[in-house]
């Protein structure tokens, strides 16, 4: 997770912070088939991102109970935003650890800005805030993350594993997990049914 501390701003330097990675048909790793990943940090040292379109069977209220943030008897009294928040599978690395991507109206000392609009917080403070209705306006909770070593993501893109495009906060945060892959492709003018294995960047 040192990547986050050394995070560089995405610009013409070719780094992909605040971009979506969209899995192509050529993706060789089944764990990432039809996934969309939001890139939180990318530098010469590697990359880190969160899968945003794979749901976990675990519900957010259950997670709060497991972590001792709320009593089981209190879970029913949670604000709707906490009761209805899906928990996502962020990736195969560190799957017991929680990460919250969220709008920049909520910032604590441990929050890391990914873009002008999006922050990443991986401490329990934000879960407590969400549980009492004092969290960010928009938030996405995931367990685990996706990581790449130096040059690995660039290699996968060169091999046609991923298509990249600028992230869109509305598509990032909305709760329609099942159709996110198709909708993000449609937002850049691509029909998933016609996805070829040709390399390309939107």
Image (tube, rainbow, N blue to C red):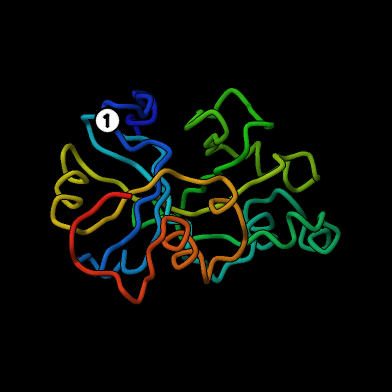
- Residue at (52, 71) in percent of width and height: 178
* Secondary structure category for the residue under label 1: strand
Residue at 83% x, 58% y: name it.
74
Residue at 17% over, 37% down = 150
Q: Circle 1 sits on which residue?
A: 43
Crowdedness near tag 1: few (<14), some (14–19) or many (≥20) residues, C-alpha within 10 Å: many
Q: Where, by quadrant of the figure, is residue 29 drawn?
A: bottom left
Give percent across and percent down for residue 2: 33, 29
| Position in image of residue 62 (x %, y %) | 66, 63
> Which residue shows up at 23% across the image and 53% down it?
200
In the rendered image, the vertical position of residue 56 relative to residue 162, given as above or below: below
Residue 64 % position (x, y): 67, 54
* Front residue of 48 and 163: 163
- How many marks the image carries: the answer is 1
Query: Relative to 75, is 152 above or below?
Result: above
Query: From the image, which quarter does the N terminus lie in?
Result: top left
Residue at the limit of the structure toward the right, as seen here: 77
Most foreground residue, 27 or 1: 27
Left or right of residue 162: residue 100: right
Residue at the extreme front: 189
In which image quadrant can residue 13 be found?
top left
Q: Toward the viewer: 48 or 92?
A: 48
* Of 96 and 51, the residue lying toward us: 51
Q: Residue most toward the bottom?
A: 193
Q: Quadrant of residue 105?
A: top right
Above or below, comparing residue 144 to residue 112 in the picture:
below
Q: Position of residue 168 (x, y in %)?
A: 52, 46
């Amino acid at each position: 997770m040192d990547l986050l501390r050394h995070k560089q701003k995405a610009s013409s330097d070719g780094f992909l912070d605040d971009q979506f990675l969209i899995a192509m048909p050529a993706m060789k790793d089944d764990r990432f088939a039809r996934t969309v990943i939001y890139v939180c940090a990318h530098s010469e040292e590697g990359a880190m991102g969160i899968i945003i379109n794979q749901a976990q069977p675990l519900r957010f209220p259950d997670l709060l109970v497991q972590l001792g943030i709320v009593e089981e008897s209190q879970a029913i009294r949670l604000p709707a935003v906490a009761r209805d928040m899906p928990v996502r599978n962020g990736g195969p690395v560190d799957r017991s650890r929680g990460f919250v991507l969220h709008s920049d109206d909520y910032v604590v000392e441990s929050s890391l800005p990914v873009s002008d609009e999006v922050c990443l917080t991986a401490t329990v403070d934000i879960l407590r805030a969400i549980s009492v209705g004092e969290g960010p306006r928009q938030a996405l909770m995931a367990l685990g993350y996706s990581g790449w070593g130096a040059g690995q993501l660039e290699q996968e893109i060169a091999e046609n594993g991923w298509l990249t495009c600028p992230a869109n906060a509305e598509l990032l945060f909305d709760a329609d997990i099942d159709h996110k892959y198709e909708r993000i492709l449609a937002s850049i003018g691509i029909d998933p049914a016609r996805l070829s294995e040709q390399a390309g960047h939107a």
